[in-house]
Amino acid sequence: MRELEHMRRAAAVKVMIFDVDGVLTDGSLTYGADGEVTKTFFVLDGLGIQLLNKTGVKTAIISARKSPIVVRRAADLGITHVYQGIHDKRIAFKSLLEETGVTAGQCGYIGDDVIDLPLLLQVGFAVAVPGGHAEVQHRAHYVTRANGGRGAVREVCDMVMRAQGTYEQALAPYFA
């Protein structure tokens, strides 16, 4: 029964929103000698986002931290809505809804910490990662099997495509 509910919620997603640290990455921050922060992204997650974009679902990033690395990764993946450096994520979310013309109920969001709760409590499909804070996992509609930065994003992208009946079409070019 719970799986049917996840799929119903995923089927309604028109915009999928991703947190960065702990979701698109494993949450580790590496500081170089010059103070530069580096992040590591998982290639399977990236292709999942690209495939999801091709099906017509818009993708977005909302992150409290600001990093030029995130801008670069978003550009590489075709994520056109990127909000960074905004601690109150509701502000960015409001702007995203206005820009895309969708409702909160037509959005999915994947987060890992309490800073993500204001959005997770508004969206139609709230997702947490298994390494995320207990309060976030408790309030999410779905907790991924894969960890943040290690396939959680791909799992969600695949779930949305399957729920919307676009998964086979998205993968078809790879079977030709």
Image (cartoon, rainbow, N blue to C red):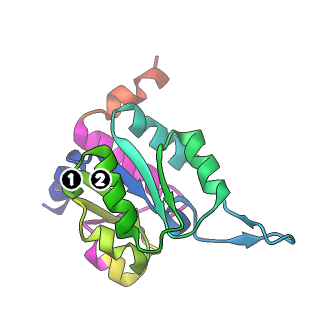
Q: Which residue is mark 1?
A: 103
- Asked which quadrant contains residue 91, the reply is bottom left
Side of 17 relative to 84 (left or right): left
Q: Residue at x 19, y 56 (%)?
A: 105
Q: Inspect the image, locate mark 2, and give the three-letter code of the amino acid beneath it.
A: Leu
Q: Position of residue 6 (x, y in %)?
A: 22, 57
Q: Report how far apart the C-alphas of labels 2 and 1 lie in the structure.
A: 6 Å
Q: Position of residue 93 (x, y in %)?
A: 35, 61
Side of 170 relative to 20 (left or right): left
Q: Which residue is mark 2?
A: 97
Q: Inspect the image, locate mark 1, and give the three-letter code of the amino acid beneath it.
A: Thr
Q: Give the quadrant of the N terminus.
A: bottom left
Q: Secondary structure at mark 2?
A: helix
Total numbered labels placed on residues in the image: 2
State which region is magenta. Answer: 138-164
Is residue 137 shown in magenta?
A: no
Residues packed near mark 1 inside 10 Å, few (<14), some (14 to 19) or many (20 plus): some
Side of 14 relative to 70 (left or right): left
Of residues 46 and 176, the one nearer the viewer is: 46
Q: Would residue 119 be visible to someone looking at this image?
A: yes
Q: Position of residue 64 (x, y in %)?
A: 51, 70
